[in-house]
């Protein structure tokens, strides 16, 4: 059974940090790109970061560049999103998703989705 399990969300003060994890099961992890998306209340889901099957990394939101880092541990079939210097505008439900090989910032391109993990940043 294909599963993407996102974890690591929580409540943090502005300036704090969190590390999200996305553990993958049931498909050939090395053949897939894994992306993080987020959806803030009342807003559309947007692509945040992605790591492709060959290790290329992409950050799609200018506001998170330099603060968020995506990484993968292929031995653990897990992708991480390290989020530093968090801001209230980062508050959202964060989802991980997978598609074959290359990254895409579009949610419609993703094949598998996990349930989200809530990140709340207080001011």
Image (tube, rainbow, N blue to C red):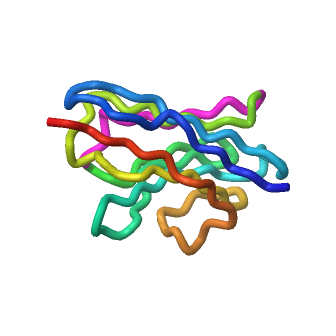
The residue positioned 32% from the left and 28% from the top of the image is 84
In the picture provided, is 123 more to the left or to the right than 35? left
Quadrant of res 103? bottom right
Quadrant of res 110? bottom right
Where is residue 98 shown, x and y percent of the image? 65, 56
Quadrant showing the C terminus = top left
In the picture provided, is 45 more to the left or to the right than 34? left
Verify whether residue 113 appears in magenta.
no
The residue positioned 60% from the left and 56% from the top of the image is 97
Nearer to us in this view, 100 or 42: 42
Question: As drawn, which residue projects farthest toward the top?
Answer: 16
The residue positioned 38% from the left and 33% from the top of the image is 83
Quadrant showing the N terminus = bottom right
Residue range corresponding to the magenta coloring:
63-75
When the figure is inspected, residue 51 is found, relative to residue 37, above or below; the finding is: above
Nearer to us in this view, 43 or 67: 43
The residue positioned 46% from the left and 29% from the top of the image is 19
Where is residue 44 shown, x and y percent of the image? 35, 70
When the figure is inspected, residue 65 is found, relative to residue 34, above or below; the finding is: above
Question: As drawn, which residue projects farthest toward the front?
Answer: 11
Quadrant of res 66? top left
In the picture provided, is 45 more to the left or to the right than 87? right
Where is residue 21 shown, x and y percent of the image? 57, 35
Verify whether residue 64 appears in magenta.
yes
When the figure is inspected, residue 68 is found, relative to residue 4, above or below; the finding is: above
Question: As drawn, which residue projects farthest toward the bottom?
Answer: 108
């Amino acid at each position: 059974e294909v599963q993407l399990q996102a974890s690591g969300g929580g409540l943090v003060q502005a300036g704090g940090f969190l590390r999200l994890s996305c553990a993958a099961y049931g498909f050939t992890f090395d053949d897939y790109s894994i992306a993080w998306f987020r959806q803030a209340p009342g807003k559309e889901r947007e692509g945040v970061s992605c790591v492709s099957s060959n290790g290329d990394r992409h950050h799609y939101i200018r506001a998170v560049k330099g603060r968020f880092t995506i990484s993968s541990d292929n031995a653990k079939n897990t992708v991480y999103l390290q989020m530093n210097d968090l801001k209230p505008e980062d508050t959202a439900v964060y989802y991980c998703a997978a598609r074959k090989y290359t990254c895409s910032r579009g949610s419609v391109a993703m094949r598998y989705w996990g349930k989200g993990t809530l990140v709340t940043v207080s001011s």
